Image: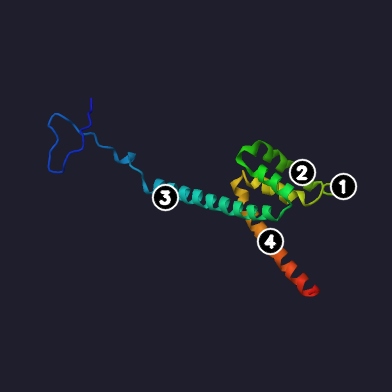
Amino acid sequence: MTTIAPPSAPSEAPHPRIRVAEAPESALPTADIMATIDRAKRLETVLHKDEARLNRQLDRFERHLPRRAGRSIRWLREPSARWVRIPVGLLLIAGGVFSILPLLGVWMLPLGLLLLAQDLPFLRRPMRRALLWVERRWVRWKRSRRRRTG
């Protein structure tokens, strides 16, 4: 039976009857494992940053919506509404695909993707970039419109 001795001061020698078990070299983390762990941590940080940025943009977007629509979107974005958000997002995407029918339109596609981006990390960055692009275009359009009229 192997017993592990308690850590001792460097000058002290362990008791002659107690054998100290040493970890085999294969049990120590290798450079590959450490690199993989480092990459996973960086990816996790990037995902959290994307989520935070997307949430900030959606918060700003909600403030510009009519009160009722803003409350609905806010409720759908809450973590407890996930069981509603995913089916609604999929239905909106399907409605956007069938935009040739009355009442359904292309507007449904980006809204469905935004809702799904709350739960699917790989959609967060593209949706955040799309929101930025739309916001910049909107501001540019409003400026050009003001110049023409005023």
CA distance separating discs 2 and 1: 14 Å
- Tell me if label 1 and label 3 are in contact, CB under 8 Å: no
Residue type at tag 3: Ala
Q: How is the image coloured?
A: rainbow
Residue at 85% x, 49% y: name it.
Answer: 100
SS at badge 2: helix
- 140, above or below 73, in the image: below
Which of discs 2 and 3 lies nearer the camera? The answer is 2
Kindly identify which residue carries mark 4: 135
Which numbered circle lies on residue 102? 1
CA distance separating discs 2 and 3: 41 Å
Label 4 or label 3, whichever comes before in sequence order: 3
Residue lying at the far right in this picture: please name it.
Answer: 102
Neighbour tally class for label 2: few under 14, some 14-19, many 20 plus, Cα within 10 Å: some
Which numbered circle lies on residue 94? 2
* Residue 84 in which image quadrant: top right
Label 2 or label 1, whichever comes before in sequence order: 2
- Nearer to us in this view, 16 or 89: 89
CA distance separating discs 4 and 1: 27 Å
Image location (x, y in percent) of residue 23: 28, 37
Kindly identify which residue carries mark 3: 35
Label 4 or label 1, whichever comes before in sequence order: 1
